[in-house]
Amino acid sequence: MKRRNLLAGAIILLSLGTSSLFADASLDEQKTYEYNNLVFSLDHVTKPVVTDNYIIFTAESGPRFVGIAFDFENYNTVHSFQVRKSRDLDNKITRSILFYILERPKQIQEISYRLIVDGLWTSDPNNPQKQYDPSSGITLSKIYLQDTQQVCTDVKRDSCVTFIYNGEPGQSVRLAGNFTNWDSWIYELNETKPGFYEISIPLPSGTYYYNYYLGMNSLVDKTNPNRAYTSEGKVASVIHVD
């Protein structure tokens, strides 16, 4: 069994190719290790995933060429997507997706970008955040780089409460509670790594009821056993802040 696992790992390494594993020779050992782990985690196409140090873009395989250009480079540079192939133990390709991993720019709060698919400039079909650009006449895709701790930067750190949700990658997870008057469109959790969502917000001492939201569906916090009925008769998670 161990030998089969080692063989599977070797096949994955071969399927990525040298250019995928070492995208930039200037990357130090730690960055290379982190980059490789991100590549290994890619198994499906999703909306852009923002981590502490990188932004991961994915696209369906099929086009001859997919590239990406960013506003902070004035769209002058087109970065090519690479291929991530998954293979089984018989070396047969089971899944193939395209990806580009951007090292997260410093001091930038939002990014506009365009995809180039077989020579055509277009928005990212996997990113619901879009904005029409009248100067170019096309729709741009947007990413808002709000840090998970950003909403707490103006208060003492011990006044912050961190909410964490684990689920499928590429989801839009929101948070609501009696501290938002149950408005679920105020706080959206950030996907800091695939399937791991978090946000920190300032809350003074007190007892708070909250739930996570996927679309219109309300979900209790499965990691928190403390639950109660709200005045509307809904089941909610409960947290006490000292």
Image (cartoon, rainbow, N blue to C red):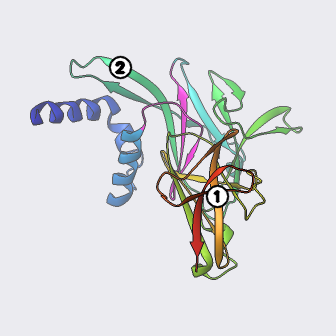
Q: Are marks 2 and 1 in contact (CB under 8 Å)?
A: no
Q: Nearer the viewer, residue 242 or 11?
A: 242
Where is 156 relative to 108, above or below? Answer: below
Left of 142 or right of it: where is 79? left
Task: Name the quarter where the N terminus is drawn.
Answer: top left
Q: Farthest residue to the right: give it.
A: 134
Report, in whole angstroms, how far the alpha carbon at label 2 lies from the one at label 1: 41 Å
Kind of residue sitting beneath label 2: Thr
The part of the image, by quadrant, that contains residue 19 is top left
State the image coordinates of residue 89 (x, y, percent, origin top left): 21, 22
**Any magenta on residue 56?**
yes
Number of numbered callouts drawn: 2
Residue located 36% across and 46% down the image: 36
Q: Which residues are magenta?
A: 42-61
Please, what is the three-letter code of the amino acid marked with disc 1? Tyr
| Residue labelled with disc 2 | 94
Estimate the x, y position of residue 111 in percent, counting from the top left.
69, 50
| Residue at point 28%, 32% (across, down) | 12
- Give percent across and percent down for residue 205: 65, 79
The quadrant where residue 79 appears:
top right
Q: Earlier in the sequence, mark 2 or mark 1?
A: 2
How far across and how far down the image is residue 147, in percent? 61, 62
Q: Which residue is mark 1?
A: 210
Is 3 on the left or on the right of 19, as rendered?
left
Q: Which corner quadrant holds the C terminus?
A: bottom right
